[in-house]
Image: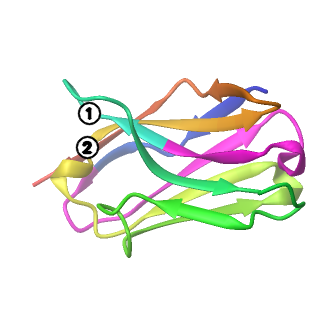
Amino acid sequence: VQLVESGGGLVQAGGSLRLSCAASRSIFSISAMGWYRQAPGKQRELVAVLASGGSTNYAQTIYADSVKGRFTISTDNAKNTVYLQMNSLKPEDTAVYYCYADHRRSDYWGQGTQVTVSS
């Protein structure tokens, strides 16, 4: 599975960005897809993930506590794309954001896209 991210950039605090992740295969065949992020000097952490639970639809959505109510993960199945809508951005959201997929018990990662939030 190849994952190609886009949509990062520089934004002021309180602003919004939308990240996109295009997968090389139908996302119906992928068990879980989502986003992680890694800030300088910190470990990579989960931001938001959709898990299918074995069904053809994503049955479970998981958000990090720090982004609940501000970030929304969604899919466009026709485009094999996962989105992360980020609102009310804070400086602490600054990080490299990575698209993630779990397919047949293997992990796949995108190349990462930088998000910088200025105060």
Q: Say left or right for 33 vs 15.
A: right
| Of the pair 21 and 73, the residue shown nearer to us | 73
Q: Which residues are magenta?
A: 11-35
Pointer 2 with pointer 1, Cβ within 8 A = yes
The kind of residue on which mark 1 rests is Ala
| CA gap, disc 2 and disc 1 | 7 Å
Q: Is residue 88 left or right of residue 54?
A: left
Determine which of the numbered discs, if any, sits on residue 94 in the image. Answer: 2
Q: Which secondary structure, mark 2?
A: loop
Question: Which secondary structure, mark 1?
Answer: loop
Disc 1 crowd rating (10 Å Cα; few below 14, some 14-19, many 20+) is: some
Taking the spot 65% from the left edge, 57% from the top edge, the residue there is: 50
Q: Quadrant of residue 53?
A: bottom right
Q: Is residue 114 above or below residue 30?
A: above
Task: Find the residue positioned furthest to the bottom.
Answer: 69
The residue under label 1 is 39
